[in-house]
Amino acid sequence: MILYGVFDSREHLYSLNYSLLIAKYTIYSSCLQEKKLCFDSFLMLLREKINIQREIAVHDNNITKFKTIYRFLL
């Protein structure tokens, strides 16, 4: 069972941990609103959060680092 994520400095584990956090948040918010859990809502939120991370990377001129970290999710 993964509670907080996988601790390692490799890029693919960073993207895995990020997606795990988004999945946990989706589960939490669905339970809070007493809705059924929907995988599509998780994917939509994950895409939205990755787009926000992309915009931040573009603004900070770190697009190559972004592509390295999130290439497994793109």
Image (cartoon, rainbow, N blue to C red):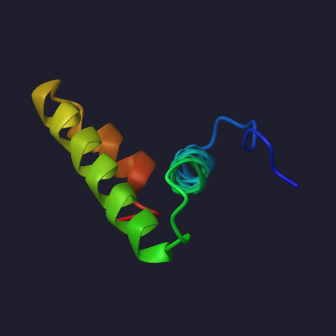
The residue located at (75%, 36%) in the rendering is 7
Residue 1, quarter of the rendered image: bottom right
Find residue 12 and report its horizontal and vertical position in percent. 57, 53
Residue at the extreme right: 1
Q: Nearer the viewer, residue 21 or 69?
A: 21
Residue occupying the far left of the picture: 59
Name the image quarter holding residue 10.
top right
The answer to which of 34 and 18 lies nearer the viewer is 34
Residue 19 image point, x, y percent: 53, 53
Looking at the image, is 39 positioned above or below residue 31? below
The residue positioned 49% from the left and 52% from the top of the image is: 33
Image coords of residue 50 (percent x, y): 32, 50
Is residue 27 positioned above or below 41 on the image? above
Quarter that holds the C terminus: bottom left
In the image, farthest residue toward the top: 60
| Residue lying at 63% horizontally and 49% vertically, measured from the top left | 13
Would residue 46 appear left or right of 48 to someone viewing this image?
A: right
Give the quadrant of residue 14.
top right
Count of numbered circles in the view: 0
Residue at 40% x, 53% y: name it. Answer: 70
